[in-house]
Amino acid sequence: MDSDRKYKQAGYSDSGTNHSNNGNGFRPKPQGPKPSIDITGPRLPRLVQTVTASRCYSCATTLPAGTDFTGTCPKCSVALHCCKQCSNFEPSTRFQCLKPILVRIAVKDQANSCDQFRPRVTVARDVSNAGGSGQPALRQAPTLNTPPPRTADDARDAFARLFRDK
């Protein structure tokens, strides 16, 4: 009966005889404990510090905490109590607002008196503790009481001292 089959691949219209599988068309699961993905050991999580702040929609200046949104931006002097600064502003919705408003506000970047206004708050990575190097502070080497090596021999001696029996 195998000779009159159109396709000779295993799995095509099997009649219970299986050539390479365990009868159900699936490979058997390996026995024993699951091997670790990382053979070098567990990795420490990367702890990234975040900052929650409001930013001006026009110049992206971080606004200080406690900013009065009825005023203007301290850098570019645009109105802060406007639709573009609101967290409900969404250009793809009706009247470009996520909240149900009755009247459309035509100019989105001028001050208005909307009752639904909530300042937009962003969450960004904190790079202020990196020391200007662009790397997080957790990546920096810890300071030790020993001076940095000055020659290759000093570095070799310091390495040998790490594994010396005490």
Image: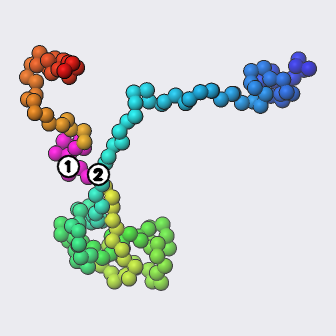
The residue stretch that appears in magenta: 125-137
Nearest the viewer among 78 and 61 is 61
Q: Looking at the picture, which amino acid does disc 1 mark?
A: Asn
Q: Is residue 57 above or below residue 149?
A: below
Q: Is residue 110 above or below residue 126?
A: below
Q: Main secondary structure of the magenta part?
A: loop
Nearest the viewer among 81 and 145 is 145
Q: Is residue 137 above or below residue 157?
A: below
Q: Looking at the picture, which amino acid does disc 2 mark?
A: Gln
Give the mark nearer the N terminus: 1 vs 2. Answer: 2
Q: Secondary structure at mark 1?
A: helix
Query: To which residue does mark 2 refer?
Result: 49
Q: Is residue 6 visible?
A: no
Q: Residue 36 location, x and y as percent?
A: 48, 30
Q: How is the image coloured?
A: rainbow
For residue 149, what is the image quadrant?
Answer: top left
For residue 84, what is the image quadrant?
Answer: bottom left
- Whether pointer 1 and pointer 2 mark residues with C-beta atoms closer than 8 Å, the reply is yes
Measuring 22% from the left and 70% from the top, which residue is drawn there? 73
Looking at the rendered image, the quarter that the C terminus falls into is: top left
Query: To which residue does mark 1 refer?
Result: 129
Q: Residue 74 location, x and y as percent?
A: 18, 69
Left of 117 or right of it: where is 154? Answer: left
Q: Is residue 7 visible?
A: yes
Badge 1 crowding class, 10 Å Cα cut-off, few under 14, some 14 to 19, many 20 or more, is few
For residue 46, what is the image quadrant?
Answer: top left
